[in-house]
Amino acid sequence: MFRGCRSSFAAAAAPVFRRACIHCTLADTCSPQPAPTPAPGRLPAEASPDLGSTSRFASRPLPFSAFLTDAFGRQHNYLRISLTEKCNLRCQYCMPEDGVQLTPRSQLLTAEEIVTLARLFVREGVDKIRLTGGEPLIRPDVQHIIGRLRQMENLKTIAVTTNGINLAKLLPGLKTAGLDLLNVSLDTLVPAKFEFIARRRGFHKVIEGIDKAIDLGYDPVKVNCVVMRGVNEDELLDFVEFTATKPLDVRFIEYMPFDGNKWNFKKMVSYQEMLSVIRQRWPELQNLPSEDSGTSKAYKVPGFRGQIGFITSMSEHFCGSCNRLRLTADGNLKVCLFGNAEVSLRDVLRSGATEEELLEIVGAAVGRKKKQHAGMFNISQMKNRPMILIGG
């Protein structure tokens, strides 16, 4: 009943859609959404086996889900889950200066709800999950959540993006629980500047966390650096040097507009400008092959142990190969980081909806995903969440 139920299910699902879909603020009900065209080599939705009505928490190998394939053939096998809206730093590009209104705890996803939704996505074809925030490592049950995710068949990779403040203390337990990959945010190598950017102290704790990750065998440890003109663009060469003897992948991220971060074009340092500065110092810089769905343009200085990369969301978007979906801490599904369309999976889950109802709503949201984002100038004028309330 389940994979081929789009037409017969539409009427039954309508009440749930009216409650859950933000597009219904513009109309009484959502229009029925056609099933996305399966990618070449995959079975169409109707050809998939009948899972029965008791399969909500099942985990079994299937062809890649039509529900996670958009109208442009992009298969979304990567889910980023925000564990919390809270953070122990106040980074300028992430959080408005006057803070954010936090969601009441009762409206945030519980650990069990996170695991339930994650299992649904994994069964449909997601094979990589990244836990974000806020700061995910301040959530007390983060190790428990990673351990539950690790038990899921077909989930290949569990990753965390962290500011590193609590990393040295918690990482041994996280590794034991099953953490595969690690990204640490670090925007400066100058302690005083760290305090200016993050509005908090903690530089030495972050460095300690990076060193602990290296000691525990994480290779590479990815370091995310948001580059802002007049703030830290003068440290590009220092960050490249940081990779000389350590297994690091320093990724320079173009400054992106979100609510409350005072973005403007003049503060953004483009990928090409950064690359030019680095090549003046290391003209032998090598371009490395990148993954088809990767966000980073990878480079390496010959002889250096680590490498660098550039995340060019603003100047050279990579929307055509996007394979990511985001689940916010309050349970909203975002199909695009820069889009303001969201749908609440929390509300649908708490209403007692079946797996089929959840998948219909996920499939409709993915089916509405646009070909590419609106461009940096349009994005800067759009209403969207602050980055801390999205999840990095």
Image (cartoon, rainbow, N blue to C red):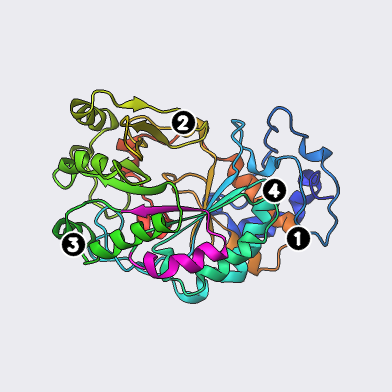
* In front of the other: 51 or 27: 51
**Side of 136 where 111 appears, left or right:** right
Q: CA distance from mark 3 to mark 4?
A: 43 Å
Q: Position of residue 49 (x, y in %)?
A: 85, 45
Task: Identify residue for label 2.
Answer: 290
- CB of mark 2 within 8 Å of CB of mark 1? no
What amino acid type should be assigned to the residue bearing mark 2? Ser
Task: Identify residue for label 4.
Answer: 124
Q: Position of residue 301 (x, y in %)?
A: 30, 31
Q: Residue most toward the top? A: 283
Local crowd size for mark 1, using a 10 Å CA cut-off: few (<14), some (14–19), many (≥20): some
Q: CA distance from mark 4 to mark 1?
A: 11 Å
Q: Earlier in the sequence, mark 3 or mark 4?
A: 4
What amino acid type should be assigned to the residue bearing mark 3? Glu
SS at badge 2 = loop
Q: Position of residue 45 (x, y in %)?
A: 77, 39
Q: Which residues are magenta?
A: 165-185
Task: Identify residue for label 1.
Answer: 56
**Side of 327 where 212 appears, left or right:** left
Q: Toward which corner of the image does residue 96 lie, by quadrant?
A: bottom left
- CB of mark 4 within 8 Å of CB of mark 2? no
